[in-house]
Image: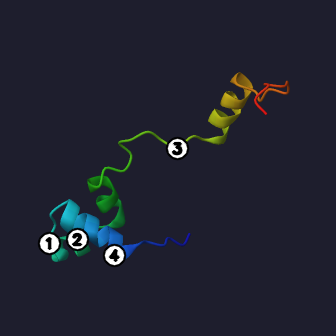
Amino acid sequence: MSARFDWPALLRAGVQGLGLRPAEFWTLTPVELRLMLGEGHGPRPMARAGLEALLAAFPDGTGDLGDG
């Protein structure tokens, strides 16, 4: 698996956002940095099953809405 990182953005987040010194930033593993930045503490993106449940609950109408 090949991972691409936006190193300038990550360095800014670590140094400016977290207050790390550059040497502290570069000793972190990517997993440690992701944890420190709060990854996993917010809502998860919708998976395919969630989208299909929404489509079933709120199907697109086929009738004329009179808006056109």
Question: Mark 2 sits on what residue?
Answer: 25
Q: Earlier in the sequence, mark 2 or mark 4?
A: 4
Q: State the scheme by which the image is colored.
A: rainbow
Numbered disc 2: secondary structure:
helix
Mark 1 surroundings: few (<14), some (14-19) or many (≥20) residues within 10 A: few
Task: Judge from the rendering whether residue 2 lies leftward or rightward of residue 7; answer left or right.
Answer: right
Instruction: Give the residue number, with chain letter if any, for mark 4.
Output: 8
Q: CA distance from mark 3 to mark 2?
A: 27 Å
The amino acid type found where label 3 is placed reads Pro
* Residue tagged 1: 21
Whichever of callouts 3 and 2 sits on the residue coming sooner in the sequence is 2
- Asked if 49 appears above or below 34 in the picture, the reply is above
Left or right, residue 54 beside residue 29: right
In primary-sequence order, the first of circles 4 and 1 is 4
Percent position of residue 58, x then y: 70, 25
Q: Amino acid at mark 1?
A: Arg
